[in-house]
């Protein structure tokens, strides 16, 4: 049932992948799965990956192994997950090989606390460094769940995690913290970093003002190496003994102090780490959505997402460079003008043609409508009866010499006459009335009385 569930997701969800094996008894032995959002998060944040194989979460005692990274908001994101029947070197090696096959890129650092996993990493990922685990990404579940219940819980947790990601993305775009200094780096950092990383940056800026030095261990040397290069110092090089940038990808307070002291007014390009930028990873507003539809619609959806991401990337990249940002704007205005000219030149389509275009149906130039068999005779008979009735009506009024007010009465009478015999009798009656030596009004009254 679980494999069928994942097969259904693979068929209807773009980029969904899973791999499984069974033991000699035909029982599920190993299972790995990841969706498209997980894969894109791994490409952006997969430099350090945590494997935690300490959770036995179901009544079959299978080990749950989540693959976890840290996103640009400093939050955990699941980039893949697995269930294993044993914590053996063989099982871990299979898992790492499948992981590498699907993702294609080897992580730089793998964090785990299992001895068997350590050996598997050395066999499958020899170029990755192994570190002991420093955190857990989930608390252990107290209850023993079936696999179906487990996947329901897992999907729910993923929805919560991605909802929090969308909230963090929203807060980054639409909240603006107060400045703590007049340093030009601060504004540049706000436009470049996510809110969480910018808060860290502001904390370091605050300590510049308070004169607090970097925190260093006993083994770390107390020095700062600096070389100013490039226009406004944009190509400068700096290194602090605390090694904060080497460890976390963020400059320390002493480095920022030196840059400010030597009037470096542009953020050095070497220290703009992509993984901490706003546009890193998956944009929650344009994340892939499971869609049933034709290939043309899916292609338009993908291209639209790429255009949106490209626009936000350019804005973030040139946020502090007015000249380059102006070039981007001017180029987009040219494209908008071209689009408008193309739109205005289009031939106006009728409502029928618009529906035909939506449905993908080519209308024929000529349409022949054939009348069903027998309809010609029926239509001809109705027309003939109508003409005859009108002629008889006029004839009876003239013959009888009565008022036109009798027209409706005669029409009703003709409607109820089934055959020619009755019509002839009415004609004779009208002739007799005309011979009466009296006024039209009396003739009319007499006709009404006999009808």
Image (tube, helix red, strand yellow):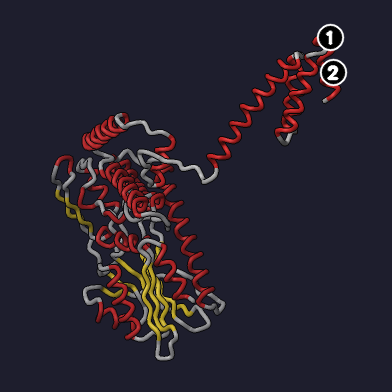
Helix, strand or loop at label 1? It is: loop
Residue 216's quadrant in the figure? bottom left
**Rendered residue at 40%/38% (across/down):** 353
Are the residues tagged 1 and 2 within 8 Å (C-beta)? yes
Instruction: Determine which of the numbered discs, if any, sits on residue 438 in the image.
Output: 1
Please name whichever residue, 400 or 311, is drawn nearer the observer in this view of the structure. Answer: 400
Residue that appears at 32% across and 41% down: 187
Q: Badge 2, how many Cα within 10 Å: few under 14, some, many 20+?
A: some
Mark drawn on residue 127: none
Figure check: 411 above or below 213: above
Q: Position of residue 202 (x, y in %)?
A: 36, 48
Using the numbered discs, state the Cα–Cα distance from disc 1 to disc 2 in whole angstroms. 10 Å
Residue 326 drawn at (x, y percent): 24, 33
Residue visible at 28% across and 70% down? Answer: 109
Instruction: Indicate which label's residue lies in the foreground, 1 or 2.
Output: 1
Quarter of the figure that contains the C terminus: top right
Counting residues from the start of the chain, the first of labels 1 and 2 encountered is 1
Can residue 177 be seen?
no
Disc 2, SS: helix
Q: Is residue 202 above or below residue 437?
A: below
> In front here: 386 or 34?
386
Q: Position of residue 121 (x, y in %)?
A: 28, 78
Residue behind mark 2: 446
Q: Nearer the viewer, residue 22 or 150?
A: 22
Could you tell whether 49 is left or right of 145 in the image?
Answer: left
Left or right of 424 on screen, residue 444: right
Q: Residue 97 appears at what percent x and percent y?
A: 29, 77
Residue depicted at x 38% and y 40%: 179
């Amino acid at each position: 049932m679980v494999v069928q569930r994942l097969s259904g997701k693979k068929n209807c969800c773009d980029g969904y992948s899973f791999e499984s094996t069974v033991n000699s008894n035909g029982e599920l032995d190993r299972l790995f799965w990841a969706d498209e959002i997980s894969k894109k998060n791994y490409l952006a944040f997969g430099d350090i990956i945590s494997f935690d194989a300490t959770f036995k979460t179901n009544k079959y005692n299978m080990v749950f192994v989540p693959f976890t990274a840290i996103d640009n908001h400093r939050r955990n994101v699941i980039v893949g997950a697995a269930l294993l029947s044993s914590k053996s070197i063989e099982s871990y090696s299979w898992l790492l090989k499948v992981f590498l096959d699907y993702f294609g890129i080897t992580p730089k650092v793998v964090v785990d606390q299992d001895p068997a996993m350590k050996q598997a990493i050395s066999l499958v990922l020899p170029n990755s460094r192994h570190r002991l685990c420093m955190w857990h990404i989930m608390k252990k579940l107290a209850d023993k769940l079936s696999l179906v219940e487990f996947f329901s819980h897992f999907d729910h947790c993923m929805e919560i995690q991605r909802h929090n990601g969308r909230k963090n993305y929203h807060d980054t775009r639409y909240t603006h913290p107060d400045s703590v200094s007049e340093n030009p780096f601060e504004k540049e950092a706000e436009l470049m970093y996510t809110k969480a990383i910018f808060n860290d940056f502001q904390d370091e800026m605050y300590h510049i003002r308070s004169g607090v030095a970097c925190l260093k261990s006993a083994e770390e040397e107390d020095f700062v190496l600096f070389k100013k290069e490039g226009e406004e110092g944009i190509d400068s090089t700096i290194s602090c003994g605390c090694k904060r940038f080497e460890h976390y990808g963020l400059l320390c307070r002493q480095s920022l102090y030196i840059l400010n002291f030597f009037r470096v007014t542009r953020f050095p390009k070497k220290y703009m780490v992509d993984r901490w930028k706003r546009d890193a990873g998956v944009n929650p507003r344009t994340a892939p959505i499971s869609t049933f539809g034709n290939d043309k619609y899916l292609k338009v959806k993908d291209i639209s997402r790429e255009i949106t991401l490209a626009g936000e990337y350019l804005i973030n990249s040139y946020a502090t460079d007015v000249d380059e940002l102006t070039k981007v704007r001017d180029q987009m205005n040219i494209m908008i003008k071209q689009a408008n000219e193309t739109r205005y030149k289009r031939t106006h389509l009728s409502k029928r043609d618009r529906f035909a275009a939506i449905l993908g149906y080519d209308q024929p130039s000529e349409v022949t409508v054939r009348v069903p068999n027998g309809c010609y005779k029926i239509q001809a008979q109705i027309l003939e009866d109508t003409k005859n009735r009108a002629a008889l009506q006029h004839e009876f009024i003239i013959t009888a010499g009565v008022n036109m007010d009798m027209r409706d009465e005669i029409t009703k009478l003709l409607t109820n006459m089934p055959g020619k015999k009755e019509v002839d009798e009415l004609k004779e009656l009208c002739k007799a009335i005309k011979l009466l030596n009296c006024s039209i009004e009396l003739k009319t009254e007499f006709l009404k009385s006999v009808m």
